[in-house]
Amino acid sequence: MSKVLFVKSNDRPADQAISVKMYETFLNAYKEANSSDEITELDLFELNLPYYGNTAITALYKRNQGMELTEEEVEIADIVQQYLNQFLAADKVVFGLPAMERNGSGTIGNLYFYLAQAGTTFKYTAEGPVGLAGDKKWLYLMHADPIMHCLEWKLAKWLRNT
């Protein structure tokens, strides 16, 4: 049995968003093929997680230094820790992302900040950062607009010829 974390970062209906349809199709097929796996689903738009900003950064710093936190700092630090622990406990992680100008949505960027914790999910070395999250299996389900690919190809071709 594996622990699988499914993360959805698109609030559009499946009939209007290829990435949502892809995510839902994969999720249902995965559940059917792996009925003994423990599946946790996160819908980032439904969760509406607090932004990872100054309060979260300060709270986590203070907690790591053993300093006293305000009530607001305790709350945000606990939320970040909850989702970080959930991520660390997963054997597999599946992200369902919209193309949104090739960047994904702000909700996924916010979650990435929750998860990118030095000393927990990565460490700094003289050779650069090194991952600490273990041997997780990852899957990104993302729709990429074929028109965008065509434009990128034409731009690359034009740049090579100038």
Image: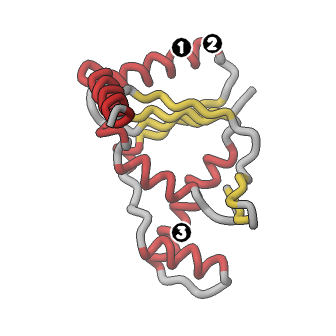
Q: Which labelled disc corresponds to residue 42?
A: none
The residue labelled by disc 2 is 33
Mark 3 or mark 2, which has the lower sequence index? 2
Inter-mark Cα distance, 1 to 2: 6 Å
Residue neighbourhood size for the residue with mark 3, other residues' Cα within 10 Å, grouped as few (<14), some (14–19), many (≥20) = many
Task: Identify whether 109 is placed above or below 68.
Answer: above
Q: Amino acid at mark 2?
A: Ala
- Picture quadrant of residue 129: bottom right
Q: Residue at the far left: name it.
A: 16
Badge 2 element: helix
Image location (x, y in percent) of residue 160: 38, 34
Residue neighbourhood size for the residue with mark 2, other residues' Cα within 10 Å, grouped as few (<14), some (14–19), many (≥20) = few
Badge 1 element: helix
Residue for point 62% across, 34% down: 138
Mark 3 or mark 1, which has the lower sequence index? 1
Q: Is residue 6 left or right of residue 12?
A: right
Q: Nearer the viewer, residue 70 or 65?
A: 65
Q: Nearer the viewer, residue 57 or 90?
A: 57
The residue labelled by disc 1 is 29
Image quadrant holding the C terminus, namely top left
Image location (x, y in percent) of residue 77: 54, 69
Q: Is residue 145 left or right of residue 42?
A: left
Task: Identify whether 134 is placed above or below 153.
Answer: below
Badge 3 element: helix
